[in-house]
Image (cartoon, rainbow, N blue to C red):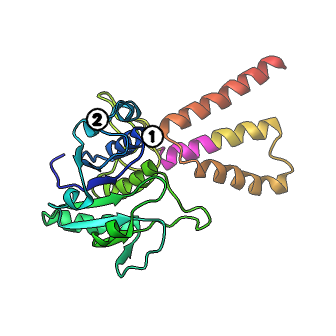
Amino acid sequence: MNEVQPTIILVEAQLGQNIGTAARAMANFGLDEMRLVNPRDGWPSEWATKAAAGATHVVDNAQVFKSTTQAISDLHHVYATTARGRDLAKAVLTPEDAAKDMRERTALGQRVGILYGREKSGLTNDDITLADSIIMAPVDPEFASLNLAQAVLLNSYEWFKLGNWSLGDGSREDGAVKQAGLRLAGSWPATKEELVGFFEHLEKELDEAGFLRPPERRPSMVRNLRNLFQRANLSEQEIRTLRGVVASLVRQHKRSK
């Protein structure tokens, strides 16, 4: 990616597997700059590569530093993640607010980084003192701790969605979905004429089958049926399919008489 993006900094991560899954979370949302501060089990790590599940470019290019101070030395603004309130006078941001702040800063060419702490104990107060602001996620206070990959994924997602939008997998033949909502798979929404035509076809056959009885209840039954299909946001292809279903049932009924 050509844009300036956040640097993910893992401070004294304990297991290679956790570094690998964090790399995978980064790659899910277009981030590729990882820095490691004194990983406990050394570096490089075969376990990290395996756990990255294809995000090997993140793992292979990870930089290793002896201290948090060295790891953040070229950054303009640093965010520290924590699940615990700290007795430090610093701005506290949600992941969503932090992502907006990062976007504003990187748009100006600033380099930003996010600190993540040890799996068991998180960041020390000395680490957090080096940061400009704190990121805290809205989680259940009775079970607030996120694992390393979850924490990286949460912030990476908030960053990504502000500048890029895609859903799921993409391929050469069929690109990733660009927005939420109804997908018509190449078919247009049914016109009101097509929809009413289906209604009238269905109601005619239901009248002949004796379903829309007694007469005084017919108007409300018709309204309920129409409203049911109206909510379905049918495509023109689906209307043709439904009319074919009705016609097929009618033919079978007549043959069985």
Q: Is residue 128 magenta?
A: no
Please, what secondary structure does the residue beneath circle 1 have? loop
Q: Give how far across and how far down residue 160 sits, in percent.
A: 32, 54
Splitting the image into 4 quarters, where does residue 97 fall?
Answer: bottom left
| Residue type for callout 1 | Leu
Outermost residue on the top side: it is 255
Q: Residues within 10 Å of mark 2 (few under 14, many from 20)?
A: some
**Residue 145, percent from left and from top:** 52, 59
Number of marks: 2
> Could you say where residue 49 lies in the image, as x and y percent from the top left?
34, 32
Pick the front one: 233 or 55: 55
Query: What separation in Å lies between label 2 and label 1 (alpha carbons)?
Result: 47 Å
The quarter of the rendered structure image containing the N terminus is: top left
What residue lies at 32% left-to-right and 39% top-to-bottom? 42
Q: Residue at x 35, y 39 (%)?
A: 176
- Residue, disc 1: 184
- Compared across the picture, whether 150 is left or right of 38 comes to right
Q: Secondary structure at mark 2?
A: loop
Mark 1 Cα-neighbour bin, 10 Å: few <14, some 14–19, many ≥20 = some
Q: Nearer the viewer, mark 2 or mark 1?
A: 2
Relative side of 107 to 13, left or right: left
Splitting the image into 4 quarters, where does residue 186 fall? top left
- Indicate the position of residue 53 as horizontal and vertical percent values: 39, 32
State the residue at coordinates (84%, 20%).
257
- Residue stretch rendered in magenta on the structure: 190-199
Q: Is residue 12 left or right of residue 119?
A: left
- Residue position for label 2: 44
**Kind of residue at disc 2:** Pro
The front one of 232 and 215 is: 232
Of marks 2 and 1, which one's residue comes earlier in the chain?
A: 2
